[in-house]
Amino acid sequence: MAVASIAHGIAPEGEPDQLYAETRDLRLQGFLLFLISDCVLFSSFIFAYLYLRNSGQGWPPPGIPRLDVGFAAWNSVLLFGSGATMHYALENWKHGNFMKYMWMLIFTIILGLGFLGGQGYEYTHLMLVEHVTWAGSGVFGASFFTLTGMHGMHVFFGVCYLTVLLLQSAAGTYTKQKYFGITAGTLYWHFVDVIWVVLFSIFYLI
Amino acid sequence: MHVDLATLERAGAVIGGIVVGVVAFYALYKDWSTPGIENHVFKLMLLLLGVGAVLAILAGVNVLGNFPKAA
């Protein structure tokens, strides 16, 4: 009813909580569609990379060093760990443990920043020591920096989003019944993790 | 005993991977019977998170990504 009222430009009747309950599924579907569209974006770049990789003579191309798998594995664990802490942040919110929720959210932000720092270190090492650049190292440099850079940008925006969530939660924006923002943040962060599972596999492990 | 940075990174990847893997699969086990689209998506993502942790462990112990040095 409330959804129909909004769609027709009529002020919805009933309590705000009722309006929230009736529109929550729509928000969830919208957010999942956003994640699916982001998935399509990454998929197109990933398949382009795999096509280019398999059309050349060997990988990495001559003159390009192998990436540091040990460091990447360590950095990946930071991001995967942040996925676990974010999941427990949401669980703690659902169970009313506000302080545990806040700490888990803070750990998630710190681990996310740690991952970004690791990626910055790897970029710096590749560019300054190995002389691998986005524009000057052919298909390898272009695909590696484009895909990991695009993912890093998602992590950065995710960290910003989680910081906003932290401030909003401290300000009392969410309640035990109304917390879609936290659910969306958790879904987004898991999505970023899952994309990295794929990128880690195709760039470092195969 | 000489421990270099690369060994520490790999050890960190293995230990961290085990912790994250256990947490992810335990959370998946606990949430297995929860209904609703959002929980199904969470379960899928927890599964993939666990797979990522396993990959990090295998990379840390040199089972995956252990390529020969270029000549």
Image (cartoon, rainbow, N blue to C red):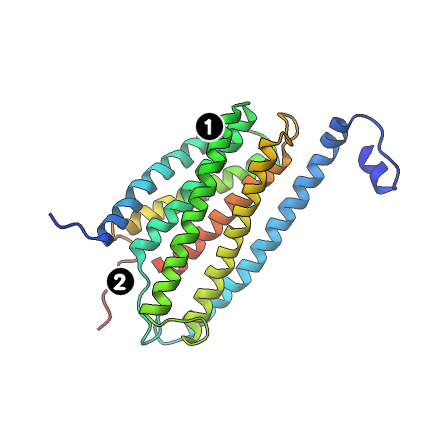
Instruction: Name the residue at 81% across, 33% down.
Output: A2
- Mark 1 chain: B
* In this view, A53 is above or below B47: below
Residue placed most toward the observer, A184 or A123: A123
Whether residue A50 is visible, yes or no, is no
- Mark 2 chain: B
Quadrant of the drawing holding the N terminus of chain A: top right
Quadrant of the drawing holding the C terminus of chain A: bottom left
Characterize the local packing of mark 2: few (<14), some (14-19) or many (20 or more) Cα atoms within 10 angstroms: few
Residue type at numbered disc 1: Lys
Q: Secondary structure at mark 2?
A: loop
* In this view, A41 is above or below A101: below
Residue type at numbered disc 2: Phe
Q: Secondary structure at mark 1?
A: helix
Residue A168 drawn at (x, y percent): 61, 35
Instruction: Name the residue at 31% across, 57% down.
Output: A69
Residue A80 drawn at (x, y percent): 42, 44
Residue A185 drawn at (x, y percent): 57, 41
The reply to whether discs 2 and 1 touch (Cβ–Cβ < 8 Å) is no
Query: Where does label 1 land, which residue?
Result: B30
Q: Earlier in the sequence, mark 2 or mark 1?
A: 1
State how far apart marks 2 and 1 are (Cα).
Answer: 38 Å
On screen, residue A60 versus residue A13, left or right, reads left
Residue placed most toward the observer, B58 or B7: B7
Q: Residue furthest top?
A: A96
Query: Where does label 2 land, which residue?
Result: B67
Label of residue A179 in the image? none
On screen, residue A129 versus residue A24, left or right, reads left
Residue A193 drawn at (x, y percent): 47, 47
Whether residue A103 is visible, yes or no, is yes
Characterize the local packing of mark 1: few (<14), some (14-19) or many (20 or more) Cα atoms within 10 angstroms: few
The answer to whether marks 2 and 1 sit on the same chain is yes
